[in-house]
Image (cartoon, coloured by chain):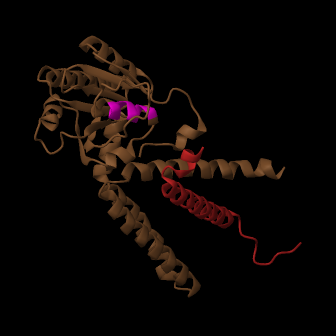
Amino acid sequence: MHKLITNNFWLKVISLILATITWFYISGELTKSKFNSYPRPPAIFKP
Amino acid sequence: MNLLIMWRPVLEILVLWYVAYHLLVFIKGTPAVQVLRGLIFLIIVFFISLFIAQRLGLTIISWILPKLFAVFLLSFIIIFQPELRRGLAQLGQGSILGMFVREERIIDEISEAVFMLAEKKIGAIIAVEREIGLKPYIESGVSLDSKVNSELINTIFMPHSPLHDGGIIIQDGRIIAAGCLFPLTQNPRISKTLGTRHRAAVGLTDETDALVVVVSEETGHVSLAREGRLTTDVDRDSLVRTLNNIFGQPKRPRFTLRKLFVRKK
């Protein structure tokens, strides 16, 4: 267990940071593109 | 409920982590690391510039930067062409046929070298790395990273050669280092008549799961050390059989989370 953590410890930390940043970035981009693809409401909206 | 919603992002991050970690391990120790540092710096600059451009409402710059980034990703493939080629070659070598052909050659080269040395009564110690990494011992020697070749092994162990005193380490089918120092065994059951070379062979197998082949300088006998035990006066057939067993065993016989992340390095 100790070796699991200490072996290439910094590589694991850096890769985890990279993975998390990538996930949040792509997730943000996808949310943005989904939001942009919704039909726009008409200029004058009558309920 | 929250857990059910959360499992997908966690799984995705874990997959990304696994891929990123193995990419980093793959390029670690190669010249690509320097290039990667530069790339990371450029990526940071890119994100900072994009953030500033968006904050200041610089629409043209905000539009150009992501496009440039896409081109930049393409250049990534060109810059890392040698590493990508090496990676693909390794994947190819990992195929069933490639693996057997390569391993058969390595076994032949090792046994040929060992028995040539034994015939000439030249002392030698060869460690074959298995699951547990031999990095500390590799660092004690001189880095080589060459193909396993009987002539090369013979040359290394020739008396008066600068590297003949230590052992050589074979990692992933390559001679990774020579002149390496191995720990001497403290096992009281080991015969007092055995020399330092044999004690070092057993010492290394006490601490790791490596297989160590030793050639005695005095008798010219070949011995095998494994799991803290020494088998003396091994003939060529037994050596080839043992090496075949070692190389024939799947490196990762069963899937465990531990083995996902523990590597040689």
Q: Majority secondary structure of the magenta segment?
A: helix
> According to the colouring, which chain is red?
A
Q: Which residues are magenta?
A: B199-206
- Residue toward you, B153 or B184: B184
- Residue drawn at the location 34% of the way across and 54% of the way down: B29
Q: Name the residue rendered at 60%, 39% in the picture.
A: B257
Q: Residue furthest bottom?
A: B56
Residue A26 in picture, x, y percent from top left: 58, 60
Number of disc labels? 0
Indicate the position of residue B90 as horizontal and vertical percent values. Answer: 34, 38
Q: Residue furthest right?
A: A47
The answer to whether B156 is drawn above or below residue B20 in the figure is: above
x and y percent of residue B158 in the render?
12, 35
Say whether residue B180 is left or right of residue A37.
Answer: left
Magenta run includes residue B204: yes
**Residue B36 higher or lower than B246, as above or below:** below
Depth check: give the residue in front, B221 or B86: B221
Q: Which of the 4 image quarters holds residue A34? A: bottom right
Please identify which colour was used for chain B in the image: brown
Q: In the image, A44: left or right of B106?
A: right
- Magenta stretch containing residue B42, yes or no? no
> Where is B38 relative to B95, above or below?
below
Q: Quick check: can you spot residue B208? A: no
In the image, B113: left or right of B212? left
User: Is residue A29 among what the camera can see?
Assistant: yes
Residue at 56% x, 45% y is A4
Residue B189: horizontal and vertical position, in percent?
Answer: 43, 24
